[in-house]
């Protein structure tokens, strides 16, 4: 069973995804890290971010792997590098190219297929594009001030003021939700959860309840 957990930055996707995966004894995939790895490769190559062909060529040449919860680029773990301010500033632009998304989505699907389709997957278009048939789809949201406060504790925040972080999150939301290919939006059949006033354990429990319901439905079939 694929469990799709989508939403913008700062809503708690990573924490919830890891918690759900641990509870179920499944692996998890942070698809955002795969796009960040592609972006890191592009930045390291020094190509113009506005040159779609050059960006795609670099992305095609890089080997992106997600191993035991750690993103790798060309065989090297790059978990810290992909969270740098430079990558954070460029990832929306790189990931907006349809050809790059197609390339990375194929990698994501292969990763899940190699695990017999049993995984918890987090991202921004998992329920709508990557795994539209996932039996459990959750879209997390939170108030802007809560998201900024949460993100301020992350390494990628680099000590920025909360107001600056809030503005950057708003800009990223706009960029991701208005792009032509795979825009950030909940799937029609996703369960939308506002995490503003919930702790991680509460959200994880809610998702696990949805998983239990889905499994029960699979065992008993439609009524």
Image (cartoon, rainbow, N blue to C red):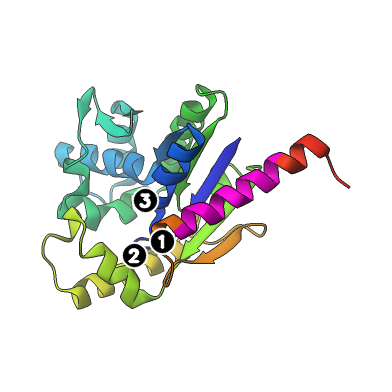
The answer to whether 115 appears left or right of 134 in the picture is left
From the image, tell me which residue sits under label 1.
Answer: 8
Q: Quadrant of the N terminus?
A: top right
Regarding mark 2 in the picture, which secondary structure is present there? Answer: helix
Height in image: 8 above or below 95?
below
The residue at the far left in this view is: 159
Q: CA distance from mark 2 to mark 3?
A: 20 Å
Q: What element does badge 1 sit on?
A: loop
- x then y, percent, for residue 3: 56, 43
Determine the residue positioned at 65% across, 44% down. 212
Q: In the rendered image, is residue 98 in sight?
A: no
- Mark 2–mark 1 Cα distance, whole angstroms, equals 8 Å
Residue that carries the numbered disc 3 in the rendered image: 15
**Which label belongs to residue 59?**
none
Secondary structure at badge 3 equals helix
Q: Residue at x 51, y 24 (%)?
A: 115
Residue 159 lies within the magenta run: no
Tell me where the magenta segment starts and ends, as one range: 202-215
């Amino acid at each position: 069973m694929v469990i799709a957990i989508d939403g913008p930055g700062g809503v708690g996707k990573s924490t919830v995804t890891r918690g759900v995966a641990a509870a179920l004894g499944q692996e998890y995939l942070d698809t955002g890290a795969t796009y960040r790895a592609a972006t890191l490769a592009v930045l390291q190559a020094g190509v113009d971010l506005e040159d779609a062909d050059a960006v795609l060529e670099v992305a095609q040449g890089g080997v992106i792997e997600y191993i035991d919860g750690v993103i790798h680029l060309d065989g090297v773990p790059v978990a810290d590098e992909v969270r740098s301010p430079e990558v954070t500033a460029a990832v929306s632009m790189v990931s907006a190219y349809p050809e790059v998304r197609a390339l990375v989505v194929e990698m994501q699907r292969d990763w899940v297929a190699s695990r017999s389709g049993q995984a918890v997957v987090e991202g921004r278009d998992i329920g709508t594009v990557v795994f539209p048939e996932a039996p459990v789809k959750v879209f997390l949201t939170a108030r802007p001030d809560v998201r900024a406060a949460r993100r301020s504790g992350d390494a990628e925040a680099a000590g920025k003021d909360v107001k600056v972080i809030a503005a950057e999150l708003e800009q990223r939301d706009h960029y991701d939700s208005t792009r032509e290919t795979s825009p950030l939006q909940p799937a029609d059949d996703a369960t939308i959860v506002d995490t503003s006033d919930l702790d991680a354990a509460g959200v994880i429990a809610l998702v696990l309840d949805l998983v239990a319901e889905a499994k029960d439905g699979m065992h008993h079939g439609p009524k």
